[in-house]
Amino acid sequence: MKTNPTVEKTVQTANGWLMLLLDLVFLVAVGFLWYLFIRSATLLREGELVNFWLLGSCVLATIAWIIFQSGFFTLQPNEGRALILFGNYVGTERRAGFHWTNPFNTKTKISLRVRNFNTPKLKVNDKRGNPIEIGAVVVWRVHDTAQALFDVNNYEEFVSVQSESALRLLASHYAYDDGEEGETTLRSGLDEISHALQGELQVRLSAAGVVVEEARLAHLAYAPEIAQAMLRRQQAEAIISARQKIVHGAVSMVEMALSELAEKQVVTLDDERRATMVSNLLVVLCSENETQPVINTGTLYT
């Protein structure tokens, strides 16, 4: 990056309304000169020459008045005008309103408003090498008009390219999901990812005088070629997780049932019948389908 960036300078331009009043006075003066010239021309006698000094004064005054008009400009809220005189940066006017400046100044308008930039969906590899699609929305604004105009070729294009580059770098440092214990992933660590992306963008875009207000992921998905396989894996993991909860709950219920039976002495079971009862209860509690009970009309031991 550039070691000696251009620094914005604040310039105070003249009040446009006062200069407009002066402009009207100037116009009256120019009109009076032309009146004098025309009057003198009509009073010429035969053989007399036109007063070329007066004519030259009228022409020069008219040209000066026309040039004077180009010094007027207006600014809306959150807009700026960078003033450049013969290639030298004069300063930036940020005050909204009607202004007048040196007519020979080049006036470059630049917006200071907050803007949104949506990156296209990028196909990158995450930390584990899985191809993913990722996109982000970047909220930014111009902070230093001098840097934005003079330190980069096109600050809007600079924001676009650097945003995509930072997003690719970020995606390669994090796994899509299922990271190690305590590891931040793109899916689970949204706030941390957003903060990291904003920080990376601010470092890159500071060279263009741009402030990043916010940066967040707007799109995140596996690439189409592995999406189906990853979906099946996620479904399998969800089923395993659900089964673990079901079995844990079933074991707790069986343990509670046996404890209640023993405590209240409802029935006394030997080890074999207790094992059979545990097996039957687990089948009932863990089965996905409704179980069909078999009624024993004899004794427990027949």
Image: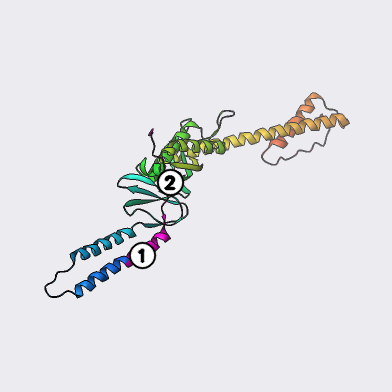
Whether residue 74 is in magenta: the answer is no
Secondary structure under tag 1 reads helix
The answer to whether 106 is drawn above or below residue 189 in the figure is: below
Whether residue 21 is in magenta: the answer is yes
State the image quarter where residue 51 is shown. bottom left
Query: Dot 2, how many residues are within 10 Å of its Cα: few (below 14), some (14-19), or many (20+)?
Result: few
In x, y percent, where is residue 255?
Answer: 78, 30
Going from the N terminus, do you reach mark 1 or mark 2 first? Answer: 2
- Which amino acid type is marked by label 2? Thr
Q: Which residue is drawn at the image coordinates 22% and 65% (left, top)?
A: 54
In x, y percent, where is residue 62?
Answer: 27, 63
Q: Which residue is mark 2?
A: 10
Residue lying furthest right in this view?
A: 265
Quadrant where the image shows the C terminus:
top right
Image label count: 2
In x, y percent, where is residue 182?
Answer: 59, 29
- Which amino acid type is marked by label 1? Val
Where residue 25 is drawn, which disc sits there?
1
Magenta segment range?
1-28
